[in-house]
Image (cartoon, rainbow, N blue to C red):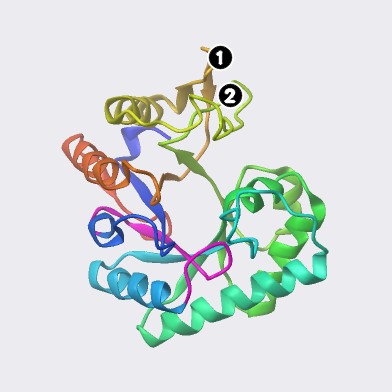
Amino acid sequence: MKTATRRIDLNADLGEEHGDDAAIFPCLSSASIACGGHAGGAEAMEAALTLAAQYKVVVGAHVGYEDRINFGRKPMRIGVSELTRQLTQQLVELRQRAAAHGLEVRYVKPHGALYHQVGVDHNHAKALVDAVRATGARLELLVPSSPMLAALASELPCRHEFFADRGYHADGRLVDRGHPDGVIHNLDILLSRTMEWLETGRVRSVEGRRVTVLAQSICLHGDSPLAVQSAQALHERLTAQGVTVCNWMLP
């Protein structure tokens, strides 16, 4: 992704009852809203959808393991049918609530450990795809780059993200959150590495080598202490560089 296109999607994981969603929404073109599995719930979904409607932000479903204790960030051993049931229920609820706000859920993004598992675990990938199919809606997937998942979801477009606030390994994997460089806490570094990726399609890894990241969207985590500052500063920097912040599905 290079600035020659002059447009990029900026999304954040919101509705998780962590951080200041109201201050982040005006900066975004997409919002991945928690569906009550790993976090959030009815009240949080309603608040996030109200803000999405107000700021004309594209809505995505941020589905995850029903594991609030670990915030959905710990891999779980769970059967395909049960995981499909959980994810379908989350999707259906957010879609129904979105419709009441005059909104349409346009994409699905797995959360936390599930995000990583759908790229490498056939059963978890199948559960995600089956859940989307069960809704009867043609939703896009915002997921890791994975030939296995892409093959399973042959009729569902798969899109990818650049994580502005996370460190990368030289092989393209995200650095574990427990690592000192797993989460970017310095705003200047976050901005410079994101703009480097936007210009070149590459970012410096923790091993010191530059890694190519193919993506159509930039992601920020709404529960990060720097979430508001990052969203505001990144939107301002992109605009100053003549880049339009716009969802990838819009013409």
* Cα distance in 3D space between marks 2 and 1: 7 Å
Q: Is residue 113 above or below residue 192?
A: below
Q: Residue at x 22, y 39 (%)?
A: 233
Q: Position of residue 204 (x, y in %)?
A: 47, 19
Q: Residue at x 50, y 76 (%)?
A: 94
The label shown at residue 169 is 2
Q: Residue at x 43, y 84 (%)?
A: 99
Q: Quadrant of residue 157?
A: bottom right
Q: Position of residue 25 (x, y in %)?
A: 28, 59
Q: Nearer the viewer, residue 107 or 47?
A: 47
Q: Nearer the viewer, residue 15 or 135?
A: 15
* View extreme (front): residue: 69
Q: Label 1: how many residues lie within 10 Å, few (<14), some (14-19) or many (20+)?
A: few
Q: Is residue 16 magenta?
A: no
Q: Label 2: how many residues lie within 10 Å, few (<14), some (14-19) or many (20+)?
A: some
Q: Which residue is mark 1?
A: 207
Numbered range of the magenta stretch: 26-41
